[in-house]
Amino acid sequence: MKNLNLLIVVTMAVSASLVSGCSGKQRHGDVSNMMFNRYDTNQDGYVDKTEYQEVATARFEKADKNDDGQVTLEESQEGRLANFAPSIANAWFEENDLNGDGIVERDEMIKKTEENFLEADTNKDEKLTKQELEADRKNKRFDSIDANGDDQLSREEYHDSKSPF
């Protein structure tokens, strides 16, 4: 019984620390910095098209479980992102399946990634700042959760998305 009580107390303490650690601005800043640094591989303070494409290609290769150069809907739903935020994983698949055949091919992903880069590059200097990248990711995350496209998140949409924000 003492072991069970200790386990419950430890579990509650860890859960509380995780929740409090995820709720403040510092946590958001840490995640934002981590994401930007993931893209900015040469650490010059900007993300160019090549760096942006490298991250997308790595994500594609990770999703392509059988290494056939294609990602099926089933493959896209097997990763950590799909478990954590299924609406984001589904939105990625739908966004990258340009011809609507139920398969994301490498060429489709490359084309869509280039479009995404150009869309995120609001000042059109062919490199993304941390602010441009962060704004783009927030907009895409919101759009992927806004299931009915009304630019508002209902309680149901938010709950169904298992949103990380």
Image (spheres, rainbow, N blue to C red):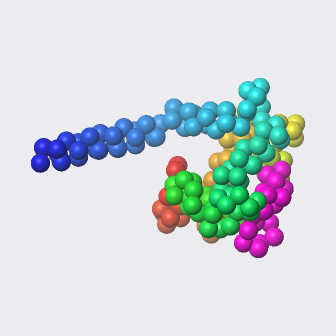
Q: On screen, 78 above or below 1?
A: below
Q: Residue at point 67% right, 36% down?
A: 38
Which residue is at 63% across, 53% downward?
Answer: 141
Where residue 140 appears, as percent x and y from the top left, is 68, 53
Image-based side of 30 in relation to 37, left or right: left
Instruction: Tell which residue pokes out farthest to the right in this image.
Output: 125
> Image height check: is 41 above or below 67?
above
Residue at point 57%, 37% (across, down): 31
Work out whether residue 96 can be spotted: no
Depicted 132 relative to depicted 110: above or below:
above
Percent across and percent down for residue 73 are: 65, 68
Left or right: 125 as drawn, with respect to 96: right
Name the image quarter holding residue 127.
top right
> Horizontal and vertical percent for residue 47?
77, 35
For residue 41, what is the image quadrant?
top right
- Outermost residue, bottom side: 101
Q: Is residue 161 magenta?
A: no
